[in-house]
Image (cartoon, grey):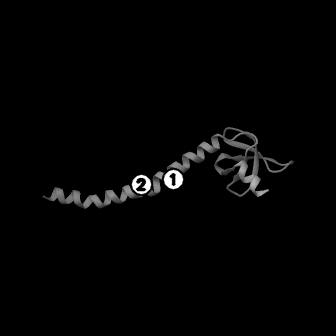
């Protein structure tokens, strides 16, 4: 009889964990995978925004870093970890 009582007391905890998983953990994992795929697919000429807010153009993707151009004279290397997102071509036309 106590065994059934134990299972009944664990059921709300299991349901709570399932809700937490589907509302928090799973979407975050999907977002991380999409971000990693975006970084892996960066090519020369793509425009990106760093986590520091700099808008750059990709010159050459390297192993741990990406060589980017800030303006015509300044070329720097940015760690892949600090790339926030890629600016799509339609976004740059809308802002111009």
Residue matched to label 2 = 21
Residue matched to label 1 = 28
Judged left or right of residue 55, residue 25 is left
What is the number of callouts on the image? 2
Nearest the viewer among 61 and 89 is 89
Task: Give the residue at x 57% y 46%.
Answer: 34
At which x and y percent is residue 58? 75, 44
Task: Give the residue at x 50% y 49%.
Answer: 29
Nearest the viewer among 88 and 39 is 88
Mark 1 neighbour class, 10 Å CA radius: few under 14, some 14 to 19, many 20 or more = few
At which x and y percent is residue 54? 74, 55
At which x and y percent is residue 56? 76, 50
Nearest the viewer among 65 and 11 is 11
Judged left or right of residue 9, residue 20 is right
Task: Give the residue at x 76% y 52%.
Answer: 93
Label 1 secondary element: helix
| Quadrant position of the N terminus in the picture | bottom left
| Quadrant position of the C terminus in the picture | bottom right
Q: Is residue 80 above or below residue 54?
A: above
Q: Is residue 25 above or below residue 39?
A: below
Q: Is there a contact, CB below 8 Å, between mark 2 and mark 1? A: no
Label 2 secondary element: helix
């Amino acid at each position: 009889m106590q065994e059934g009582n134990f299972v009944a007391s664990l059921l709300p905890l299991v349901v709570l964990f399932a809700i937490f998983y589907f509302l928090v953990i799973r979407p975050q994992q999907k977002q991380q995978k999409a971000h990693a795929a975006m970084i892996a697919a960066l090519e020369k000429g793509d425009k990106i925004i760093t986590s520091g807010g700099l808008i750059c153009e990709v010159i050459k993707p390297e192993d741990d870093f990406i060589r980017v151009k800030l303006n015509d004279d300044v070329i720097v290397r940015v760690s892949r970890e600090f790339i926030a997102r890629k600016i799509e071509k339609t976004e740059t036309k809308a802002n111009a």
